Amino acid sequence: MKLIFEKSVPGRRAGRRVPTDAKASARIKPELLRDRPAALPELSELDVVRHFTELSRRNYGVDSGFYPLGSCTMKYNPKAAERLARLPGFAGLHPLLPQLPGGEMMVQGALAVLHEMDRLLREICGMAAFTMQPLAGAHGELTGAMIIAAYHRDKGHRKTTLLIPDSAHGTNPASAAIAGYEVRSIPSDADGEIDFGQLAEALNDEVAGLMLTCPNTLGLFNPRIREIADKVHKVDGLMYYDGANLNALLGRCRPGDIGFDIVHLNLHKTFATPHGGGGPGAGPVGVVKKLVPYLPISLVRERPDGSFYLDYDLPKSIGYIAPFYGNFAVILRAYAYVLMLGRDGLRRVSENAVLNANYILARLKPYYGLPVARLCMHECVLSASRQAKNGVRAIDVAKAVIDRGFHPPTVYFPLTVPEAIMIEPTETESKETLDEFISAMIEIADLAEQDPDAIKNCPKTTPVGRLDEVAAARKPDLASL
Amino acid sequence: MPFIANTDEQRRQMLAAIGLSSLDELFHDIRPELRCKDLNLPEGLGEQEVHDRIAALADHNSTGLISFLGGGVYDHFIPAAVDAIVSRSEFTTSYTPYQPEISQGNLQAIFEFQSAVCRLTEMEVANASLYDGGTALYEAMMMALRVTHRNRVIVDDSVSPIYRTMIRSYTSNLGIELIETLSAKGLPDRDALREKLNGHTAAVIVQNPTFFGCIDDASDIGELAHACGALLVTSVYPISLGLLKTPGAMGADIATGEGQSLGLPLSFGGPYLGFMATRKALVHKMPGRIAGRAFDSQGRQGFVLTLQAREQHIRREKATSNICTNEALCALTALVYLSLLGKHGLRELAQTCADKAYYAQQRLRKVPGVTVRFPDRWFFNEFVLDLPLPADKVIRKLIQRGVAAGFPLVRYWPEMDHSLLIAVTEKRTKKEIDLLAHLLETIL
Amino acid sequence: MSKIPEGLLYSKDHEWIRVEGGVGTVGITDHAQHALGDVTFVDLPKAGTEVSQGEEACAVESCKAAASVFAPASGRIVEVNASLADDPGRINADCYGEGWIYRLELSDPGELSRLQTPEQYRQMLASEK
């Protein structure tokens, strides 16, 4: 398929020029101007619409079909939330308005959304207060690491290290390092959990905290979580909760109740806002009472008369981590979702998510490697280790799944499981869909025995086959100029 | 139950297949004392109720004000085709293109977005997006530290104070020497820069147009920086690049900016779009996702995420950045917007904004007592006026009369308490500008 | 089976070093290149850089992994294999020959005693399995 630039026809226009009614001509000094116009394509509106429509047909979304990407929570995105986010009363609001004298009263509806969402998330997570500012999960992790650092600095502690399990998502150690911490990786035990003994050994006065995903990236809930929290708190470390897997616990168990001090959420995962092909997301961070002073500036507060205002007077705050109040339109969608689900609906989420994942696990474990023989939570991890004897690897299984009309599960994560296949169905999938997927996976396992080459040649039904990623990285061609 | 398809009967069948008899058994690893009581949350509402509730909140916001607010975020007109395209569910409900064969739509769009950013900025390579202009500038700074192995950065105070505050917050405890130079009449003061530049400087950071709206040619700053082995890092307003000299032409090593003006609604602060472009030689130190061209065994062209070893999922604590989810849909939006405007449309739009701003400045400086703060500077679509009364007072009165006149610079520069930053886009009419002038004449 | 040539010394981080007249040529072992997969990029160090034994000298990347290349001994980097910029695959094809990465003027040859002989390296690999 041609690039949009290759479809350009000199002289072609999409729209008319907007006439300027203010008869003035800004003649900026030529030395300050560009030599020639930007080489953007010249196309008609139909050209543009067709181009992107064709691109969309070379894509696959949750609305297209089953999308069991482990750790990403690809649940259905309610269309009601989309419509609300587009309301002009929100879409047309300039973020600097409340910073004008008298401007706060112009944005009371928007401030109400932020305020309400803070309250709802506090209850859902068992936290004392939330910041809505972080613009993605990783951004929330960085914010959390900065809050940890601010707390310890304020207390006069010399803490240099954050502990992170080796099964953690790469954003955890990356965020810790960016916040200035050394990272110490704690190995997993044979049961897939963080090794309790090694963790205990690693805990000393230099440890600022422990970052955990719970359930962990193998979809397992650590029964010793309270003990772990107690041990970390004993060295005055803080417990950080990576909320990527909150879908397993919604309405059932709250991070704040099981010993966590800081939480980040992924609204584009647990709270059903669209993934967008890689964003925008939002990563609100919640903290327990002792960490509230360190939250980023600003926070939305309510006056006795019920009006809302932005509080900039936070002397111990870590400062500004985003330009304004967060990815507002994403937060708004999540707010609509929480209102639609309500108390009961949130519980049903975790129940059905965990049921769906265990159903897949139970049906597929006779055919694939099983790293840990336990009930899983909202996602299960299998392994293509059993197929290895025929030279079939997890990547091959994934490509074969594509040919059968589904998006593949996550492969090669967590790093602690060789040939990992991580399946997260989410609660919005029906049994029929799961059964179809299970049949496909069983068929692939059979084919791996009978005709491994058939699998290694997948996918065959897509616009392109497997692409030479090595060549692409060796001689990068990153832009059409 | 909304969004959950399975019936009780289906759940029973599934439990049987697992070998359990109740849903509660699924949670056996969560001991009873760890479970929460019933959450103190409202009951779920139907779609109609939720719509009414939230629509009422939308009505509680004043979007009817005639706005001259800018400061890095601008009220531009968004053609209908943008939303029609970008709201397609194959784009909105997909995720990171980990499996390239079924994600060629997203991957080609990323490649085209990268290309569009390069063509706009006249730089060589760009990434798939960062969160916003401020975090993009911070990431550019960190990249400069990595590239030069140095520890000292100069930021001019004509760079957005919002971005400077963010940079300070991120780096205040990392042992990085952050020096802010005072600008002179709306532009970076070359003498101040010369004084601070040395062999330990990793980067000089400037913005074009500056936060005060003044247009600069930073080529000479680039030369000063390069002479010391430092990088030139710029933050740029993309619509202005319809007319203005580009970061590439100025010799910038890293160009960043806020892409909100490229088809994204104001949306009370987000989601927005950070972009970053750099020289090819520095690409391995650039953060963010990157899409590259690739071929399959039959020679068919496609696109893949590439140079991933820079990123967190591989490099972990040594990664160029922790970024994972970025602003992909916003980048697509910008690409669509730029494709619709096209080569000539962008130039004309920029000219229209400049013309209207010029008209506004001419008209407003005629208001008795009002002066242009940087009269000798060229400006694009934003400029500073000095008022005879404190700007705060004037703004409050104007808001009451339905006009958001501009941004009071006193929020960041205490001595500028009479100064107002005014932005004009193609959406502001002569009538609206004349109204502002008339109201000012009445109030002042 | 991993190739482990004689005449070289090996580090526990899978680097090899060939010492001739006070200058050591450094690369990564067959085991390492195999674990990495097709090498896509080498972040070559700068000539003139001083490194200490065990310090990271540079990095090697593949599509799905990245590995640090440490200095098997202390010294000053005097030469780098510039051909790796255009052809990083040399590390896979000929990791002990054309795939060499940098040359080091040793500041303390005594440090070499801390490295492993081919046989010791072979045993280390066997025990890691």
Image: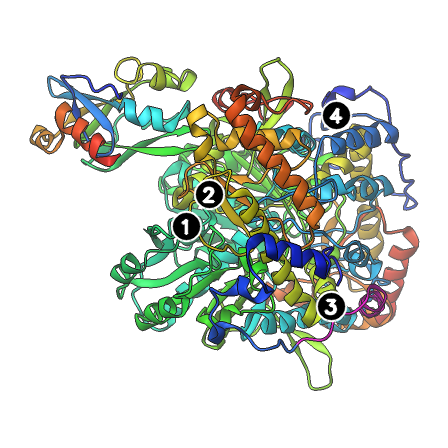
Q: Confirm or deny contact between disc 3 and disc 2 (CB under 8 A).
A: no
Q: Does the magenta stretch include residue A236?
A: no
Label 1 crowd (10 A; few <14 / some 14-19 / many >=20)? many
Range of residues picked out in magenta: B41-59
- Residue at coordinates 67% horizontally, 58% vertically from top-left? B11
The answer to whether residue A198 is left or right of residue A324 is: left
- Residue at coordinates 10% horizontally, 31% vertically from top-left? C108
Q: Position of residue B45 (x, y in %)?
A: 78, 69
Which numbered mark, 2 or 4, is in the foreground of this view?
Answer: 2
Check the residue under mark 4 and report the chain it is in: A
Secondary structure, mark 2, is helix
The residue at which mark 2 appears reads as: B312
Which numbered mark, 3 or 4, is in the foreground of this view?
Answer: 3
Q: In this view, does B65 lie above or below B155?
A: below
Identity of the amino acid at label 3?
Leu
Check the residue under mark 3 and report the chain it is in: A
Q: Position of residue A216 (x, y in %)?
A: 46, 55
Q: Nearer the viewer, residue B48 or A432?
A: A432
Please tell me which of labels 4 and 1 falls first in the chain: 4
Measure the C-alpha gap from mark 1 to mark 3. Answer: 34 Å
